Each structure stands twice: as C-alpha cells, then as structure tokens.
Image (tube, rainbow, N blue to C red):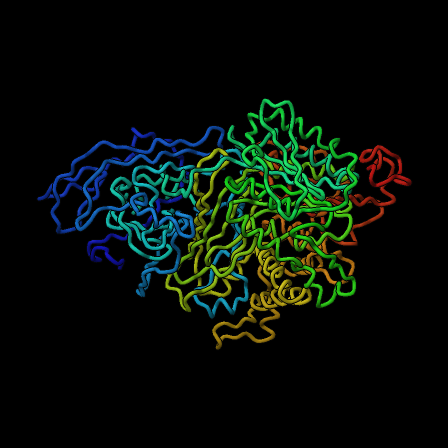
Amino acid sequence: MHVGAPPPQQQQQLPRHPPPGGAPQFRTFGSSQPPPQGTGGPPRPTGGTFIPVGVPPPPVGVSHPPAVLGPCNPSQLSAPAGQQFRQYNQSPLLGGPPPPGGQFHSASQQPANQFRAAGNPVMSGGSQGMKSYSEQQPVPDIDFSIQVPERFLRFTTKKFPSNAGLSGACRLPFGGVIRPLAPSIDEGDGVSVVNPSSSGIVRCKSCRTYINPFVNWIENGRRWRCNICGVLNDVPSAYFCHLDEQGRRRDADTRPEISEAVVEYIAPAEYMVRPPQPPAYFFVIDVSLQAVQSGVLARVAEGIKSGLVDLTGDDRTMVGFITYDNSVHYYVLRGGSSGPQMLVVSDLANLFVPAPEDLFVNLADSRDVVHNFLDSLPDMFSKNQVRDSCLGPALKAAFTVSKQVGGKMCVFQSAMPNLGDGTLQFRENPRIMGTQEEYQILRPGNMWYKDTALEFSKAQICVDMFLFPFHYIDAASLGELPRRTAGQLYSYPSFDATTDGPKFVSELRRTLTRETAFEAVMRVRCTKGFKINHFYGNFHIRGTDLLALPNCTSDSVFGFEIQHDEHNVNNSVLTVQSALLYTSSEGQRRIRVHTQALAVSNSQQEIMETADAETITCLVSKRALEISLSNSIDTARTKIQQTCIDILRSAKGGGGYGGAGYPSQQQQEEKEIPASLKLLPLYTLALIKNVAFRGGNDVHPDERVQARMRMACMYVPDCRYFVYPRMLSIHDMDGSAGRPAAEGVEVKPSTVAGKLKVVLPKAVNLSGERLLASCVFLVDSGVDMFLWVGSAAGEEVFNSLFGVNSIEGCSSAEV
C-alpha cells in the first residue's frame, strides 16, 4: 500500500500503460490550447459539489467549495530559430483549488537559494538528506520501451543485482557511460524541448529529481511518487490532469517530460546565477621559431579562419587573440579600424594587460579585421628567431582578459615551456620506461597547471590544447589544463604541414563548430538503495557529485560506477537520471535530462546474460587509467585481466552466489558463456595491447599520455574501435560500397557510416592469417587509418587505388 494513498478497497489496480501500439505522435499546444482531457473524465460525485474537468478532486470525506476558474498565464518563451528540437509549450490546464491542508507547490515557487548549491541553483539536492522509509516498495508497472537511445547512454548490464552479495558474485563493473549532447543520427530523432508553464519545472521536493515517465501517479493524479527517493509529491494545480483507466495521465502523449526518456527544458530565471554570457573563443598561439619553421603557425591561422566562418552562436559571439614566444603579444581588433594593433609585454614577472576591454571583440562587428589579422599572422613572424616559450604567462594574460565572460580557450604549443610560470623540466628517462616506475612520468611534474586549471574552471573557461612536439614536451603536465576544465588534448608529433595539416585543420574546425554547451554543470542521481560511486572523464567535481563543466560538447563523455548503498534493495527497478544545466550558443539557459529505468533482479544468470561487453570494456579502460596513475601500468594490466577472468568465471557459475547450489568443476566447464560476453576476452586482450597500457620501452611517454587522454573521453563505439579496430576488405568490395544505402532497405548500423548511411566494405576479423599477398585491407581505429597492400595485389588494384601500376618506389607520403 502506498504511503498517503487511499485504503486498498478504494484503489483499483490497473496497468499503467495501454497496450503497445504505434509510437505516440506529439502535437504542439500553444498557450491558448490546453492538451486534451479525454471524453469521459472522472464520474460526477453524488451528494456534493460538481468538480470541473481538470481540477484535482478533494480527498475522500472532505468537502470542498466550488472551483473558481481563472485565466491561464503560460510562459511565452520559445526555442531559438534553427534548432532541430521538437517544441512543446506547457500550457496549464483549467485551474482549481488547492488540496485541503495546504497549497500546491511548484519548482518555480521554491526559494531561490534552494537552486544555488555550490553557486549553481538547479543542481541542488541529491540522495543525501532524503526522508527514510523502510516499508516494502510496490512493484511499479514500468514501460521499458521508453528508454534513452544508446547514442546518449549505455550501461554495463540491463539488469542490476538486488543486493550487495549478488553484486559481488557477478563480478561485473556496474555502471554506465553517458554522452549527454550526442548528435542526432537521423532526421526526426531530435530531443523534445519543453517550455515550462506557470507551474515551473516539476521536481521532487526531497531529492530534486525531475518529473519523468517512470514516476507513479496516485490519488487520481493529485500526487506522484518519486521513483528515486520514494517521497510523495503534490501535483501543482496548473500541472494537474486526470488519469485514464490505465492509471496514466490523459495528457501524457502531449508532455514529453512524462512520455520520453530524454527531454530538454528551457530553464526559468531562477535557474540562473548570472545572465547567460555570449559565446566566447580565445586563441593563445605559439609563434616561436619551431612553430614558424614547421608550418604550425600557418596551419593554425588557416584552421581558425575556417572555423570562424561557421562558428556556432549568434551575433553576440566574442573572439580574442594572444601570441607568445619570450614575450606576450596582445591584439586590438576593433571593428572599423585599419588593421590589428599589437601590444607587446616583455616583463613576464610583472605581467599586465593593457586595454583589456579592447582585446575581446564582437566577431560580427570585427570579422573583416579578424580575417585580415589571421591572413597576415604567418608573415608577421616569418623571420622570428626566438626559441623560448612563455606559455604560463600567456595563459595568465588570456585568463585576465576572458575571466569575466568565460568560454573556450584554444592553446597551440610546439615546445616545452621554459620561461616564467609553468616552466617545465625535462623528465624523459628511458631507463624507467616499461618498468614499475614509469607511472611517475605519466603524472604531472609541475602542479602549476593543475592549480591554474581549477581557477579556469571557476571562471567557466574550458581549455582545448593542441600540441606539436618535435621532442619531449611533458604532455602529462600540460594535459592537466584540458583534463580539469572539461577540454580535450590533441597531439601531432613531428608535425608535417603537408601530411598532418589537413587532419589538424579538420579537428580544429570541428572543435569550434560542434555543438557546445557553456557554463555547464551535471549531476547523476539513482534510486534509493544505490549510489553513484565514482566518475570518469574530464571535469572538476564540486562537493561529492556535481560535475563542473565550463564546456560540454557533443563529444564530451563521462563514465560512472553504481554501487549498493544498502545491502538489500526493496525496489524492483533502478532509475538513473542525469541532468545537465547549460547555456546554449544562442544564449538560452537549458536543462538536458536523461532518465533510464533498469530492472533489478535476484538471478545471477539473468544479470550476466544482459551484460554488454563493449560497455564493460569502455568502463574498465577508464578505471584502469586511474589505477595506472596511482600504482603502475603493470598493475593496471593485471587488473584488466583479472576483471575479465572473474566475469567469465561468474558467467559460467563460478561466482557461486547462494552457497548450497555452488556448481562443480564439471558443471562450470559444461556451461557456456552468455553470447553477450563472448567477445570480452578478445576486447580484454586488445585493451592490454593498446598504447595506453602496452608494456615495453618502445612507447614514448608523450605518445602514451595522448592515448590515455583520448581513451578517457571516448564513448562506447569509439572505445571499441580504438581498442579493437575494424579491418575492411578493399580488394573484393562490391559496387554498393562507398555509396549511400538504398532507401527503404534495412541495414545493420555496423555496415554503414554517417548520416547518409554510406555502405562500408565487408569487415573481417583482425588476424594475421587474413593478410595475404593478394589482398588489400583498410584498418580503422577511429583515430588513425592504415592501408595494408599486399605485394601481389595486381596492377588493376594499384591503378584503381593509387593510379600507378606498382607500389615499388612509391612514397607513402604521396599516396
């Protein structure tokens, strides 16, 4: 029996959802057109006051005065033009009197300080401080067809253990990997946008969970039970709607927040600490001798100019530039001026910023001046002979200019910093490579970059760093900036402008033009009895569970682990909800909410059969990266191997949960590994051979750091190909390869690529036996591509691929 619910004889147990049919078709309702209430509605009470449709009925046995219907005043907010979102205006239904004993409360009526935990209003609350209740929770009727698409969120298993003992017996790493702003794959699969009405965003009064499709409605829709903490909440009068004969709200199909697992709210004013800031991009560019002679500077100017043409945002977008060698150079780029004005500061010990208000300019007003500056930048330093690098002072100067606005900072570095703050020492030591001591050079050698990163994070500045090392550059120390500011690290060793330039320009352009959320914070909640134990990725964590993300892009990925907070869990469903509060490029404050319901099981076999080997590999890799920093790479490899062994032993019955039914050795050998886990040994072997974990002394420390930083930010499919690349057969591909798939033909996602669903050549297993002299294969790791050409492939193959009759004497750089 529900707490606060009518006695059993007054309840009618009905399934929550109607029988499955087609996908619900949503319509847009304006402020003057409320969602439909159905034709019937509740029966008219006898011997009492008539209650209009849309008004919450009073509790049994309590008289109530007639309702006074007032005018509706819904929000008139609208989504920005050009967004590929489905828009829903949440118009209130007919108003009604409050329930006896108090007023209905909405999220917007809460005191403002309830929304400002750690300087952030929306993300307050969590599992701490919840009201305790020990009664057995009812088994909810969950519609598991409402799920978060896998491009956003994947879990290591689709069923979670009901108690800590069973969890230990399964030996699985329970958790998930989330990509909150994953791009759309097909037209029509965008995220629905909700405009809150006067009732505000409906959230649990205790744990602050957002209303979602898996809450339980009771008392004819007057109250709802939170599926995270179990607390009963009153429904705001403006949000009320009667339930249908299945116990489902009659307006469910018109409200994405209670019918879809992924939804985005336009945040009201109380969800803002300050007005949304304009999109801001600041570029810190190395102009020392090495950067000039290698062609890095010319390619940087080309890449920035290419990205600015299609930069996301509106006419408020701001840009700024600083260059540096042994001094710091500022640039005034006011619109209408004849050209850029350069200001040079050589005193690195007493660095100051001249005219800071003129160093950040509006791109729309100054576009011509900015483009002229980028065109002339390589020539300005073409004769520069300075070899020194004062990266630290340049970062301090850039921080001073941009700290009031925040935004994205792109740093381009080609030599180890050797002047001013942030000076680094040469730490490469071949004698410890491949030994137990190697982890020491994978840690930062100078904590200045970590401390600076925390200041950047507080100012909402994200750093994306592009390295062009020709020698050891200490990427482990420099990488602390992007790691703690939710940025990314890119590296192009021994950069060649001809062969590496196009890849760099493409990656820089994507960095600037992909969907970017500014001033973001994220929190992940889960059902009472479970807890989020650990997070993985690039972020700074505030408190215990609030991820501070100055930027969150469509490529941002975070891993998390789930543990039992109580030995036995009374719930039959585990709900996990993530909430990302951010400012869009168009200046709107928004909240992206993902809610996933997972079954809780007492059966070890059921849990193992629903395991996901790819997600397990992805999460294990992120965990092993942290282990290798605190212990050694060898310890991390051993942990990866042992995790695989334990999982397989448990899958074959060796976990032995239950004691009396422990299987014999013969029974274990006869039992097959579930199909979902059969590739786990293969992925495990590939993982320990990856550059991030491979033993030996042949991996350069900067190369290993780059691989580790890349793996830490990879989503499940990307990690899978990075660990176990796909090999495509080129020599025998048919005519459909390389062309979009035929319309109306159903294809497997693994056989096509891109939004156009271009058909890929046939994929074959990675095996030396496949590499015959007559074959040609393309190996794709998602980061690098390798074309293997057999010596006896034939003139026809060489001609069609390279335009030559033989590869003898051909340079790979010319292919």
Q: Is residue 352 above or below residue 362?
A: below
Q: Position of residue 69 (x, y in %)?
A: 19, 34
* Quarter-of-image position of residue 359: top right
Residue furthest out toward the bottom: 660
Residue furthest out toward the right: 809
Viewer-closest of 25 and 73? 73
* Residue at (29, 28) in percent of width and height: 32
Viewer-closest of 442 and 378? 378
Question: Can the viewer see residue 312 in this picture?
Answer: no
Viewer-closest of 419 and 174? 419
Viewer-closest of 785 and 426? 426
Considering the image in quadrants, where does the N terminus appear? Answer: bottom left
The answer to whether 63 appears left or right of 485 in the picture is left
Question: Can the viewer see residue 12 in this picture?
Answer: yes
Q: Is residue 607 above or below residue 213?
A: below
Considering the image in quadrants, where does the C terminus appear? Answer: top right
The answer to whether 705 appears left or right of 336 in the picture is right
The answer to whether 293 appears left or right of 633 in the picture is right
Tell me how many marks there are. 0
The answer to whether 700 appears left or right of 680 in the picture is right
* Quarter-of-image position of residue 5: bottom left
Q: Position of residue 219 (x, y in %)?
A: 24, 50
Q: Position of residue 676 (x, y in %)?
A: 58, 57
Q: Position of residue 437 (x, y in %)?
A: 71, 67
